[in-house]
Amino acid sequence: MGKDVIIACDFSSAEKVYSFLDKFGEKRPFLKIGMELFYKEGSQMVKELKNRGHKIFLDLKLHDIPNTVRKAMFNIGAMDVDITNVHAAGGIRMMQEARLGLAEGAESKGYQPAQLIAVTQLTSTDQEMLETELLIKEPIADVVKKYAENAKKAGLDGVVCSPLEASIMRLLDLISVTPGIRLLGDSVNDQKRVSTPEGAKNMGSTYIVVGRSITAADNPLEAYERCVAEFCD
């Protein structure tokens, strides 16, 4: 499977997304659409971006009872996105129902189902938070591995994890979508477990998700191409 750089479009409106993408000329980078933007603009913007030739990672992190997640995933499947996700903390049955709903939604429109991945632990979570706030005493790497094993049992394609755990996912034969990527010298902001694109490549990430290092750059296209050169070449 080819590696790719996914740009996190953490903008407040579709207009800001289109204005940002105008800077890329004929290039059609892989885009991540998260909660802020999707809850503002909805499926119409996803459809427009797909029509423009972009692959879409719809990052909504579903986490609810299995039946509710299955119904929500049916609607996501009908959008023809390329990757979408759930929280692994919802358990194996919830993830199985998500996979079924996604396939049903895609089939209803004649699409191929998206890759379905599970969030293990957010990159803003560190060991102290895991223990003091979530009352999980195991080492974070062990927790991530267990959640990934559950995702594999549920039939998912891979996980969202930090680059630090990407090598574990390779051993489990799962794809890894790794946020928390910063170009060397950029601020890590609220992320705790981070890496450069080159570091993520060396640790075995399948996809990297890059936000502010590209979207807040003086020259976003140049920053994107630098990420591609470091990660994909």
Image: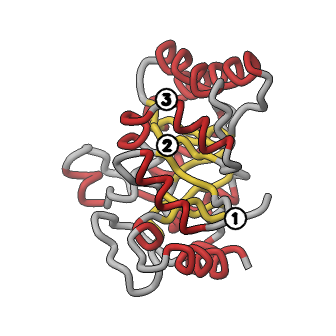
**Count of picture labels:** 3
Quadrant assignment for the C terminus: bottom right
- Disc 2 crowd rating (10 Å Cα; few below 14, some 14-19, many 20+) is some
Q: Who's the residue at 66% across and 50% down the image?
A: 54
Q: Is residue 176 left or right of residue 104?
A: left
Element assignment for label 1:
loop
Question: What is the three-letter code of the residue carrying label 1?
Answer: Glu
Element assignment for label 2:
strand
State the residue position of label 1: 26
Q: Residue furthest left?
A: 132
Q: Who's the residue at 77% across and 28% down the image?
A: 111
Between marks 3 and 1, how big is the CA–CA gap? 41 Å
Question: Which numbered mark, 3 or 1, is in the foreground of this view?
Answer: 1
Question: What is the three-letter code of the residue carrying label 2?
Answer: Asp
**Depth check, front residue: 72 or 214:** 214
State the residue position of label 3: 91
Q: Who's the residue at 73% across and 16% down the image?
A: 108
Whole-percent x, y for residue 216 in the image = 38, 71
Whole-percent x, y for residue 139 in the image = 39, 58
State the residue position of label 2: 59
Question: What is the three-letter code of the residue carrying label 3?
Answer: Gly
Q: Earlier in the sequence, mark 1 or mark 2?
A: 1
Q: Earlier in the sequence, mark 2 or mark 3?
A: 2
Residue 231: name its quadrant: bottom right
Q: Residue furthest bottom?
A: 185
- Disc 3 crowd rating (10 Å Cα; few below 14, some 14-19, many 20+) is some
Residue 77 versus residue 230 in the image, above or below: above
Quadrant assignment for the N terminus: bottom right
Q: Earlier in the sequence, mark 3 or mark 1?
A: 1
